[in-house]
Amino acid sequence: MKKKLLCLLLSSTLLMGMVGCGDATGSAKTTGTDDEESLYAEDAKLKLWGSQDDQEYLQDAIDSFKEDFPEAANWDIELAVVSSADAKDQVLKDTEEAADVFEFASDQLYSLVTAGTLYKITSDREDVESRTTKTAVDAAILDGNLYGYPSTSNSYIMYYDKSKYTEDDVKNLDTILSKDLGSDVNFAMDLDNGWYMASFFFGNGCTLFGTDGQDASECSFNNENGLEVGNYILDLTHNKKVGNYDDTLLLSGFADRTLGAAITGTWNAVAIKEYLGDDFGVTTFPTVNLAEGKEVQPSPIVNFNIYGVNAQTKYPLEAMALANYITSEKIQKLRFEQRSSTPVCNSLIEDKELLGSNPAVSALAEQVALASTVQTSNPQISNFWSPMEAFGQDCIAGNITHDNMQQALDTLVESILAKLGE
């Protein structure tokens, strides 16, 4: 790894230079020799941010980094607590005082890049792209430039009670709904939450802010495909076998065994496993039949946690080396083992034996690879959530019907694309 990284740093970073990528003073030594070791400062000082729950695995990662990367043996690497959810605000507040390497959620990318706070990744790009799922890499790219190292993914999957459904039953939502479970609820999801509802639109080919998620003037939720989805969602909201459940309600349903299946994230896996015991089942989002003969695979929104390098770091080469290492196959495996995080490294996702030890993570990794849509980081997304919530609630309340569905979708899209602040 040492030779590969050094080669990449020589061929990419030095040839491309550091113009516009932040202050590089204090980083690379310029001895004028051919000694590859001179690329790195012997006494680099780096600060790394991570959440409170990630401190143990990150300290293990730092220790491993110093063992595997001799150049870092004498580096002073300070570990501090700032979560990925809070990183953007802290970095924008004072970039100079922020960590050299920090984790952020992929939907924060646009704001961080436009503020000039992220270092453009050049030296490790080929390595990152070769080992990482394409969806995760795309989440770290803006305008063709790579701005971080993907580490883990976050989305949603389906949990089910094996005493009520077989593995074949849960492959298709309409099959699930065809079962007679008596007074029990066959299926539940948060039907007035855009994060979940959008999966149906994306699965049927609709786009939000263009194909790359950055065109704030485009949303096709009201086209012909969107109309099919709108009518399907409407039917779900009026089906007595379907529950509009948030996390609290679905956990209660699994706890008293009155719920057959539900859509939620890996954060509820432990509780659901405890409630269902040997009947615990988990799988990808089932397909849906939008029209006669048209079976569609929904595409859930997915976010990624990404490690970025501060544009104002005094040690860009060293910071990139650290960020690349803590998102490597070795450390993603460590994170999975210690934190049950879903890896984005291709080799780990393909390791069925490894992921098999955690069925929920295995299902999520499969879902992201099968069908998923990266949540856009464009600020226009702030106009998305409330209109989608209102659309779902109006379907539930009966204010939207099949007859006025097109009008409702036109209003939805108009609200999503409205100029921010209006």
Image (cartoon, rainbow, N blue to C red):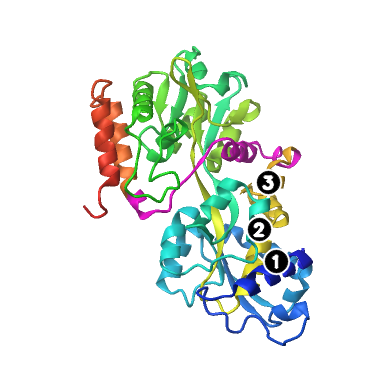
Q: Is residue 251 above or below residue 417?
A: above
Secondary element at tag 1: helix
The Cα atoms of the two marked residues, 2 and 3, are separated by: 14 Å
What is the magenta segment's predominant secondary structure?
Answer: helix
Circle nearer the N terminus (2, 1) = 1
Q: Which residue is mark 1?
A: 8
Residue 245, x across and y down, in percent: 41, 32
Amino acid type, mark 1: Leu
Seen in the image, is 89 located left or right of residue 422? Answer: right
Q: Which residue is mark 2?
A: 126
Q: Residues within 10 Å of mark 3 (few under 14, many from 20)?
A: some
Q: Which residue is mark 3?
A: 346
Circle nearer the N terminus (2, 3) = 2
Of tags 3 and 1, the one toward the viewer is 1
Q: Quadrant of residue 65?
A: bottom right
Report whether residue 330 is seen. yes
Comparing 333 with 281, the one in front is 333
Amino acid type, mark 3: Asn
